Image (cartoon, grey):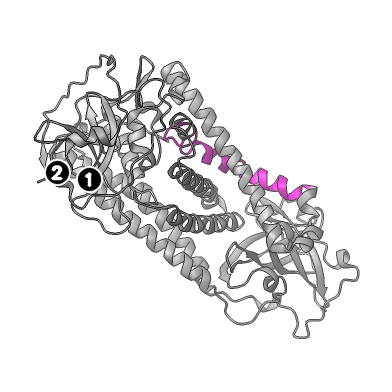
Amino acid sequence: MILSGPHLNEQGGFSARRLLFFMWMSLGVAPLLLQARSYVRFVTPHKISRSLLPPETDVHETTDLLKHCPVEGLFIAGIWWNVVPVFYYPHDSGQLCHFVVPQYNIHGNYRLGDEVTNASATTPSSCTNNSYPFSHYFYHGSIGYFAFYEEAKGTYCANDKTAYVLVGGLGTYDSNGAPLDHDRGSTEYRQSYWYGLSGSVWIAYRILMLRRSYISCKRYGKRCDRMSESLRLNDAVVYVQESMRLSAYDARNYHRLALLYLLVEGLMGDLFLLIAQEGVIGRLQYISLGYNLSGVMSMLFEMIETMHWLGERLRCLFKRLLFNYETLLLGEFVCAGAMQHYLTALNRSKGFKHSDSASRFVSPYVWSLVGHGVIVLGCVLVLVSVRSLGAIIFVRWRYGCFAVLTTPCCVDATLGVRGKLMVLGGYYYDNRRLYYKLATLKAFGMMKMVEDDGQEFLVLHKLYWIVIPRRDLFVIGSVQGKRVRPCPERLCTGMVSSFTQILGGVVGEPGSVRRLRPFENRVDSAPATIKVESLRSAVPVGCPPAQSPQVNSQLSKPTVLESFP
């Protein structure tokens, strides 16, 4: 969600460097701390309460199963979850039952007392005089070879056959599939080395990514302050978000597949935490689920972009509809508001509530993929619908037409996969052509390099994986008037300043069927040998001269040049 703000460094003495640092802390460090908190809770060894473990003889029965194990649902964190009893252990005091939630690969035990007690905090008032002590533990299988652990206590309401509990313990354990199905617990401490390793890799990579983002923001903020360039709040949001992208500019699809696996594992953790977080933290968890799901969608679309399956017009349409800053968190907030009702409706449906036979037929692990897939599919539909509708309404309100969604822009074509998201309000639309405003160019960190012969180029800060060289400015396109055309990447060797005019226009000549493909993200080892004259041969189809829109682009501050020898 873009927040429009004033030029803070003009009005309040807030420099561009400080503004970028503030946004970096808010958008990068704060979410990482929440993720690290969840990781520590899960990676800490856990021990199952002895009262929830079966007797050493492990003798179980199924006679009069529903009479001894009457619980039909668990009410956890505002969501109702269906429970299917499998068998019970004979016991003199209370009932110890083994249960499953078939559509989510959940297996565990619960103990139900036989004496009336005070209702728990989350139990409805109608159950005040008909509540019984209740406690449970279960393991929730993930995608990898580990399972999430949860232990909770509360009361069982005989009126609606639902247990209302509050979560007390969390953890992970190296088990899944058939071994998890036959697991009966242990008196020893348990932990997951699989989750510990994959989680630590993910946290470490996020830290490296934030370090890269911090250095990029620091350098760009210094350049803006040196050139007396102001940054609005929304400009800082865009630059920080772009600098925190997960993949580097020279990433390959096998790199993105590895990141995608880590994202999916994180998504499974978010799905599990839906039944472990209460109150405000729980609401934040819903937003986190939608945000991480958006990250998965963005990574998949990035892979499609690099494979060049889409023409430029279609690529721009999908990206402007689904990946723009104006509707960035809109779908996530809608998901957060509807998630409890959506999951409760799914769990009460006949297809899931009585799906134990299907789980046994195809295996609990495979059936859990179906169950989690339905949740994810519903969230994706909400995200896509809300973002698309929001983008259409915004474009119609801002520009008075829908053509902006499908009109190609040579700046977008030059950026290609380097751009994480688009700014719908950052265009100037004139005579069926799209141009980047000066503020939008600044928000993405795009600057102008002028060589000795007067040739102008578009330069950008390159994002690497781990190494962050001092000379991170590189050329990605040549500028001719207001047009930009892609060129082979090379290090910046000229004078750098801010743009004084808008950039954009058509991509290629009218009627051309050529599909523009971005150049490989490689930096030449000897940039000085690249001749400007050879750029015309490198890109055989150029942008024809067209009538440029009359836009007043005078700067209120003097242009300051920065030399890169």
Q: Give how far apart the Cα atoms at labels 1 and 2 are.
A: 9 Å
Secondary structure, mark 2, is loop
Quick check: is 333 in the magenta stretch?
Answer: yes
Against 541, residue 83 (above or below) is below
Q: Are discs 1 and 2 less than 8 Å apart at CB?
A: yes
Magenta part of the protein: which range?
320-349
Quarter of the view holding residue 179? bottom right
The structure residue drawn at horizontal position 64% and vertical position 50%, both measured from the top left corner, is 373
Residue 6: name its quadrant: top left
**Callout 2: 10 Å neighbours few (<14), some, many (20+)?**
some
Q: Amino acid at mark 2?
A: Thr
Residue 493's tag is: 2
Instruction: Please state which amino acid type lies under the numbered disc 1.
Output: Arg
Which of the two residues, 34 or 481, is positioned nearer the viewer here?
A: 481
Pointer 1: what residue? 490
Q: Nearer the viewer, residue 527 or 460?
A: 527
Left or right position of 558 against 433: left
